[in-house]
Image (spheres, rainbow, N blue to C red):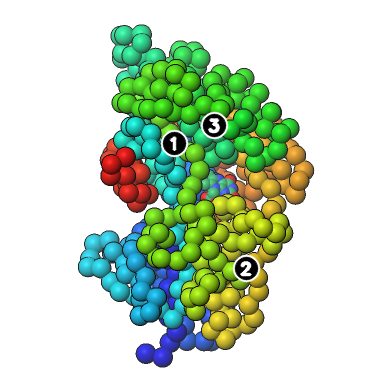
Amino acid sequence: MTHQRVVIVGSGFAGFECARRLSRIVRKSGADVKITLVTPHDYMLYTPLLPDVAGGLMDPRFVAIPLINAMPEVELCIGAATDVDFDAHTVHVDMVGCDPQELAWDRLVLTPGSVTRLFDIPGLAQHARGLKTVAEGLYLREKFLRQLELADIESDAEARAARRTVVVVGASYAGTELVAQLRAMADTYAHRRGFSPDEIRFVLLDTSKRVMPEVGEKLSDKVLDVLRGRGVDVRLETSLEELSDDHVVLTDGTVVPTHTVAWVTGVTGAPMLEKLGLPMEKGRLRVNADLSVPGQLGVFAGGDAAAVPDVTKPGSITPPTAQHATRQGKTLARNVAASLGIGRAKNYKHRDLGLVVDLGPRFAVANPLGVHLSGRTAKAVTRLYHVYAVPRATNRWAIAMTYLTNLAAPRPLTMLGLVEENEANFAASEGIPTVGR
Ligand SMILES: Cc1cc2nc3c(=O)[nH]c(=O)nc-3n(C[C@H](O)[C@H](O)[C@H](O)COP(=O)(O)OP(=O)(O)OC[C@H]3O[C@@H](n4cnc5c(N)ncnc54)[C@H](O)[C@@H]3O)c2cc1C
């Protein structure tokens, strides 16, 4: 075999972009390079719209970019990489539906992303669910809709109130978007059923002093006003003490009866990284500015899995965002190609362009290039940005049509019953070891 073998682990923003770009570079150069993408799923998930999936607005297939359509010349290996032999240049893959495989590589790109960060809180792994995967997004939607339906036939007022209560932990952008989308779904449900939306209670918790500190004080204050205006009970500097199947206890001692708890408090590097024996920083793999792994010739890493030096802010690492992961994917493709003799390598450098955060009906906040926007303008910017940023025309079209439909019709309140409780727990959906938690 004379061709060079590039194995990429993970098909998120970084792995997807790296595979797509690299296959283009290779095709143009005419070099004999085989690219294999190891991934548990045959799609790339556009996570920024997962809150919309949980809130019943978006169909999950619209935010899943099919890898075969997007990059037909890249070989897919559907499974999870569990270990790497850096001397033998092989990666061990637990396959879905067949025996494990040892894949040989000449260049290895590690982009397995991140998973929800868990804490040792009694009942957390058992009773809360995250928002990192399609299974979790769909489960939250169905679990909440089921609770609303059960509440409708509940004769006991306290039990009904518990079913109509949702607790979301984490008031960063993902948790705040989730609470806004679930609130919008709850309002639609209440209007259809003819009771007051105020009867459905939302509690949003965070240990920090602000909601969404990443958008700056001014926008953060606006978000807090809008959330409280929609009846969301926002409790800052507060988290969970313990969870059971019908209530949670907050760190301030308050008991909140509920059956639906979402845990969206931040991320840490994918579990496989710890096994590799490579230097780590804050749960992420340490890499050089050109995204190569120190001391491992031919090994590269990027995205949420890697602690990439931020050359625009010396001494810091780039935050775990899709914006950085996508651009690191491009740099990975360029530098892997350069290491194979095609083109020249360069260091990763990107100045943050800001965030867009969709907060349900008629409201969003955005700070593109430092310009602070909120309300309907930000809403338009946010939706246009997502339609632009989704990396496939057919998905873009479907998302744009969903937004247009939503202007004229209420969101559908359908439970498809596709995800079981145990398929959406942290172990099954994200691969986080939770035994003993
Ligand atoms: C709800 C939500 C909303 C968000 N909104 C935004 C936003 O608006 N803007 C923004 O910039 N960022 C946002 N983010 C953050 C963004 O999603 C991440 O920064 C981005 O996904 C990181 O890309 P990645 O490629 O490093 O990892 P991921 O996208 O996490 O992809 C990693 C991939 O690797 C796979 N994988 C994991 N382990 C293995 C293994 N052992 N073997 C093989 N494959 C493996 C995973 O299944 C996954 O497909 C959001 C995140 C969430 C959860």
Quadrant where the N terminus sits is bottom left
Q: Can you tell me whether the CB of the residue at mark 2 lies under 8 Å from the nearest atom of ligand 1?
A: no
Whether residue 58 is visible to the viewer of this picture, yes or no, is no
Q: Amino acid at mark 3?
A: Thr
Q: Nearer the viewer, residue 223 or 82?
A: 82
- The mark lying in front, picked from 3 and 1, is 3
* Residue pictured at 64% horizontal, 48% vertical: 385
**What is the CA distance from the residue labelled 3 to the residue labelled 2?**
33 Å
Is the residue marked by circle 3 packed among few (<14), some (14-19), or many (20+) residues within 10 Å? some
Point out which mark residue 263 bears.
Answer: 1
* Residue pictured at 48% horizontal, 32% vertical: 169
Q: Position of residue 354 (x, y in %)?
A: 69, 48
Kind of element beneath mark 3: loop
**What is the CA distance from the residue labelled 3 to the residue labelled 1?**
13 Å
**What is the CA distance from the residue labelled 1 to the residue labelled 2?**
33 Å
Q: Amino acid at mark 2?
A: Ala
Is the residue marked by circle 1 packed among few (<14), some (14-19), or many (20+) residues within 10 Å? many
Q: Position of residue 97 (x, y in %)?
A: 24, 62
Q: Amino acid at mark 1?
A: Trp
Point out which mark residue 207 bears.
Answer: 3
Apparent side of residue 254 relative to residue 353 in the rendered image (left or right): left
Task: Give whichever of discs 1 and 2 has the lower sequence position.
Answer: 1
Point out which mark residue 289 bears.
Answer: 2
